Amino acid sequence: MAASKFLQKIKGLFSSKEKTDSTISTTVNLYRQQLAENSKNFRIRIKLAELLLSSGEKEEALAEYVTAARLYLDHGFSPMAIAVYKKILKVDPEHMDANLQLARIYQRENLFADAITYYQKVFEFYQNNDQPNEALSILEKILEIAPDKGKFRRMMHKLFPDFQEAEKSTYSDIIITDQSGKNMPFDKHDGPDEEDFFDLNAELSEEFNAPDSSMEQEMTAIEIENEEDIGVEQVFETLKKTFAEDADKTSEDDINQQKFHYNMALAYHELGMTEQALDESNAALQFDSFRVPTLLLRGRIFREMGDLQESLSQFQQGLRERGLRRQDFLTFKYELGLTFKQMDDPVRALESFREAYSINPEFENVAAEISSLEEGIEIL
């Protein structure tokens, strides 16, 4: 009995995920130092946001998530931006910028019903904060893309009686309501400009009265169901279709074509869609330029799934890849250590962590991992 309790204690020591305030503070500072050296390190910024969120620093975490999402948009990759904005909305469903950016992305992909849902949330934000000019601007966007314009026209005339809708030809109206995707092709460089963002502190030129109860009921009546996971798979499928069409027109050596499957795997992984992430990562493995990061991602995914042997296999294959950089070797060794640790193999975990430590003692929390394992082995 005593031996059993003793082994359980050791196992807990090896697998413990608890962090002291000191450790969290040290890790946060380390992440910020890395970001100071390279502000476009998306993964570190996301990890910083997650750590801040877990330690109760909600506003700081959201700020880091927003920065990461905007960086993804600036670099022309919507799937990861969508994944990050979805994370933001899980923390703060009323987050204005996340709702606005998702609306824009979905509109660009011709997923108008989904875009309208997020635009409505932005409209309500402006409405509740007495910002009539911004609210009117959003309602105009909704009216422009809504298949059934009647409800929104009634709302527009009630809230903004002086508003005059611009006339459109029949042909232009067809373009607006066509959801086939042929009229508004996705342009990965067509991200929102900084001046397109609404100024929440803008001077108000008129008073704005909240809608009465009948208008609130009408807003409720046009809401879309299942808001939690709106459009993600649809958008990703649209992107994959666009990619397949573009692939026929570009060289296989085009770096944007090569990185597509890897980036899709990252996005699926961020959203917890494991099966799709593994499918996309399989496709990414065919490109030499992305084999190393893909093997690293697959190793992490399999570890999260509990398939530790397969996780080990991916990391070990990564270490055998040609042209491995020093930083890659360091990362694979550290990840190997985490997998061995989860396999309750402290000796091999310690060996891997020590190799990582010899390259960079400040990498991740490798020093703390070594200290914890050495203490456990001494007890044994």
Image (tube, helix red, strand yellow):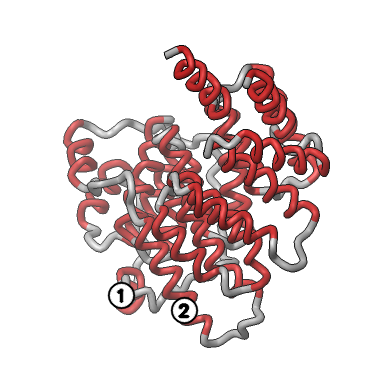
CB within 8 Å, label 2 to label 1: no
Q: Is residue 72 above or below residue 363?
A: below
Residue 92 locus on image (x, y percent): 43, 33
Instruction: Please identify the quadrant where the C terminus is shown.
Output: top right
Is any part of residue 28 visible from this angle? no
Residue 238 locus on image (x, y percent): 40, 69
Amino acid at dot 2: Ala
Residue 236 locus on image (x, y percent): 42, 63
Q: Quadrant of residue 174?
A: bottom left
Mark 2 or 1 closer to N-term? 1
In the image, taking residue 118 as reference, residue 261 lies left or right, namely: right
Q: Residue at x 31, y 73 (%)?
A: 178
Amino acid at dot 1: Ile
Of the two numbered discs 2 and 1 in the rendering, the one whose residue sits closer to the viewer: 2
* Residue at which label 2 appears: 244
Q: Residue at x 69, y 65 (%)?
A: 321
Badge 1: residue crowd in 10 Å (few <14, some 14–19, many ≥20): few
Instruction: Please identify the quadrant where the N terminus is shown.
Output: top left
* Residue at which label 1 appears: 174
Q: Residue at x 52, y 26 (%)?
A: 11
Nearer to the camera, 245 or 266: 266
Nearer to the camera, 354 or 47: 354
Residue 147 locus on image (x, y percent): 25, 63
Nearer to the camera, 94 or 22: 22
In the image, taking residue 113 as reference, residue 140 lies left or right, namely: right
In the image, taking residue 277 as reference, residue 156 lies left or right, namely: left
Q: Which mark is residue 290?
A: none
Q: Is residue 274 above or below residue 244?
A: above
